[in-house]
Image (cartoon, helix red, strand yellow):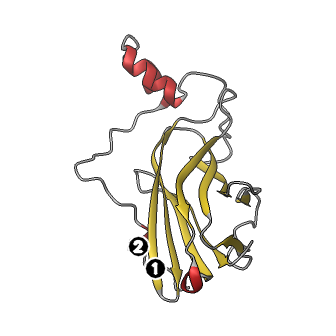
Amino acid sequence: MSTPHPDELQPEQTEGFKVGEKKTLEEYQQLDQNDESLRKWKESLGIGSGKSLSDPNDPRKCIILSLGLEVGGRSDIIIDLSKPGSLEGLNKNPFTIKEGATFRMKARFKVQHQILSGMKYVQVVSRVGLKNKMQEMIGSYSPNTTDKPEYEKKFETETAPSGMIGRGHYEAVSKFVDDDNQTHLQFKWSFDIKKDW
């Protein structure tokens, strides 16, 4: 697979949306303490509950732990992204998806040090020179705490291609990026669409 042009992995922008002013966790905690709706919003982000799990020796804001594939009636296919060296073999060791199977991808991740705003998953899949771009909004999250040690986001349900034309080897480039256009992880991987598992 030729590497996608950097523009192909850029997330789509929502017309009229402007990224808000950056604030620290402490500023968010103190913000309008008497505002009931804002208090509920902060609670939904997990601000103010539990002890922080942020590692002071790890500067990353977001750590992607795994990417998974859920298929009804089958064990999940999990790509563990947390181990050193785990990304190197992804493109060389494709996994199989049965043609026409309905599946859903999911991501497990941790946030540390500050609020992660507007994270998106962007993926470009190619086969025989044809490319298909997909984007999934993951959302905004506060740093993980003892009350919420990690997050999991399940994506929209998809259906694998089928038929002779749909079967074959596919290569993908995936990227996790936030509203500040900071890339948290980008990697190549591959999969095969076959008649059976």
Q: Are marks 1 and 2 in contact (CB under 8 Å)?
A: yes
Q: Could one spot residue 136 in this view of the protein?
A: yes
Name which residue lies at 24% across and 53% down: 15
Mark before the other along the chain sequence, 1 or 2: 2
- 92 shown above or below 119: below
Q: Quadrant of the N terminus?
A: bottom right
**Vertical relation: 126 (above or below) 9:** below
Please state which amino acid type lies under the numbered disc 1.
Lys
Residue 31 visible in this rendered orientation of the protein: no
Task: Report whether 82 appears left or right of 190.
Answer: right
Q: Which residue is mark 1?
A: 131
Q: Residue 176's x, y, as percent?
A: 52, 58
Q: Residue 69: which numbered mark, if any? A: none
Query: Marks 1 and 2, Cα distance to the nearest angstrom?
Result: 10 Å
Residue 177 in percent (x, y) is at: 48, 56
* Residue in front for this viewpoint, 148 or 161: 161
